[in-house]
């Protein structure tokens, strides 16, 4: 779906347009800073920083096998971004489902949240948790591997 790229594209285009105006007015430093900031915001709101999404059915199947949480998310969601950033590298240990790309994932979130597509919704052992504390989600992940292991 292309709608996941609308917000990042608007941020990048808007920042580029304003930076061009600043550059034309003789403010190259400010223009460069604004361009870098808009690029960073576009990247943060894009699906690029999230682990690769799988479908809801595949995530459920994998979770049943390995016991890892399933995280339902969507691009542009501030709370999803907070969860992703606070999990750090360990975020890849969860199964991520982008509800804008997977209708079954969106339906699962609506079923867990009284018809609302409230994300992040994290499913652990078949139990849905809406916008849980990132520290709690980290506890649900398998232990991090040490370099000696």
Image (spheres, rainbow, N blue to C red):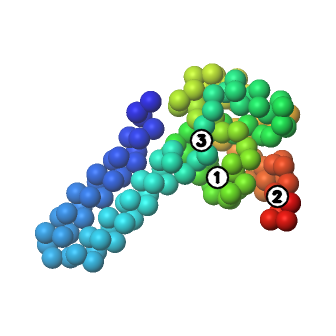
- On the image, numbered disc 3 is attached to which residue? 52
The image quarter in which residue 90 lies: bottom right
Side (left or right) of 109 relative to 141: left
Q: Is residue 125 left or right of residue 110?
A: right
Instruction: Find disc 2 in the rendering and name its residue.
Output: 145
Residue 108 occupies quadrant: top right
Q: Where is residue 132 in the image (x, y as percent from the top left)?
A: 75, 47
Give the percent coordinates (x, y) of residue 30: 28, 74
Q: Can residue 128 be seen in this view?
A: no
Q: Relative to 62, say whether 137 is above or below.
A: below
- Comparing 141 with 146, the one in front is 146
The mark that comes first in sequence, 1 or 2, is 1
Q: Position of residue 39 (x, y in %)?
A: 38, 59
* Residue drawn at the location 63% of the way across and 22% of the way down: 104
Q: How crowded is mark 3: few (under 14 residues within 10 Å), some or many (20 or more)?
A: few
Q: Mark 1 points at which residue?
A: 84
Q: Do the residues labelled 3 and 2 touch (CB within 8 Å)?
A: no
- Left/right of residue 83 with respect to residue 63 in the rendered view: left
Residue that appears at 57% across and 22% down: 103
Q: Nearer the viewer, residue 33 or 68?
A: 68
Structural distance between the alpha carbons of marks 1 and 2: 19 Å
- Quadrant containing the N terminus is top left
């Amino acid at each position: 779906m292309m709608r996941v790229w609308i917000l990042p594209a608007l941020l990048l285009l808007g920042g580029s347009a304003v930076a061009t105006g600043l550059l034309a007015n003789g403010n190259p430093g400010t223009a460069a800073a604004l361009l870098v900031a808009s690029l960073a915001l576009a990247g943060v709101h894009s699906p690029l920083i999230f682990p690769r999404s799988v479908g809801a059915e595949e995530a459920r199947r994998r979770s049943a096998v390995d016991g890892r949480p399933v995280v339902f998310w969507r691009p542009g969601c501030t709370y999803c971004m907070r969860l992703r950033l606070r999990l750090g590298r360990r975020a890849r240990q969860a199964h991520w489902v982008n509800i804008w790309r997977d209708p079954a994932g969106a339906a699962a979130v609506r079923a867990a949240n009284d018809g609302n597509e409230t994300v992040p919704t994290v499913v652990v052992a078949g139990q849905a948790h809406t916008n849980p504390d990132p520290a709690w989600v980290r506890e649900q992940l398998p232990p991090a591997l040490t370099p000696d292991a």
